[in-house]
Image (spheres, grey):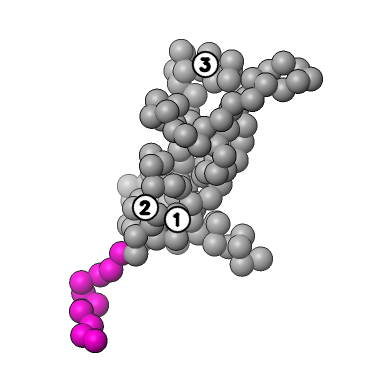
Amino acid sequence: MGRTVRRAEATECRQCLTYCDRVIAPATCAQQQCPSLYTYDDPLSGTRYMGCTHKVFATEIDVALFEQAEQAKGFGSLKLAREPLAHCRFSVERAHERPRGEEFHCVNRRFADFPDTGPGGLKAFDLRDGLRSE
């Protein structure tokens, strides 16, 4: 149960009514020639699929449909399934963009930063906490 909670905290924020999700565009993975991006041919259907070996995005994508979508308007983004790797170019997508009301203002501004818990993540510190002498 604890593992599920940590994964949800790493990929989505529900601290306010904005509802933010970390997403990644597989096109950025292909453009930067990510070493974690793999392809394989399904022996039954002959269809070629691609995916992430680290399961940053959990789905496997039909390469032909991906290329068609990229030529049109673009494939789009997928919600992260786990913490991104240091080289992953993720972004934050908001479910609600509401100008009025205090409840729709983001209360977790660090959510757009690279997560501390991810591989290669750096622990951030707040200077307002002061420096401890040891």
Quadrant for the N terminus in the image? bottom right
Using the image, determine if residue 77 lies above or below residue 107. above
Q: Are marks 3 and 1 in contact (CB under 8 Å)?
A: no
Query: Which of 89 and 94 lies nearest the eye of the viewer?
Result: 89
Q: Is 79 situated left or right of 129 in this image?
A: right
Residue at x 46% of width, y 13% of height: 72
At label 2, counting other C-alpha atoms closer than 10 Å, the crowd grade (few under 14, some 14-19, many 20 or more) is many
Q: Which residues are magenta?
A: 124-134
Q: Is residue 19 visible?
A: no
Counting every numbered tag in the picture gives 3
Q: Position of residue 80 (x, y in %)?
A: 51, 44
Mark identifier at residue 114: 2
Pick the quarter of the image with the C terminus: bottom left
Residue at the spot of label 3: 67
Which residue is label 1 attached to?
Answer: 118
What amino acid is found at the position of numbered circle 1 in the picture?
Gly
Q: Which amino acid type is marked by label 3? A: Glu
* Residue at position x 40%, y 54% in the image: 120
Q: Amino acid at mark 2?
A: Phe
Query: Does 99 sit left or right of 80 as displayed?
Result: left
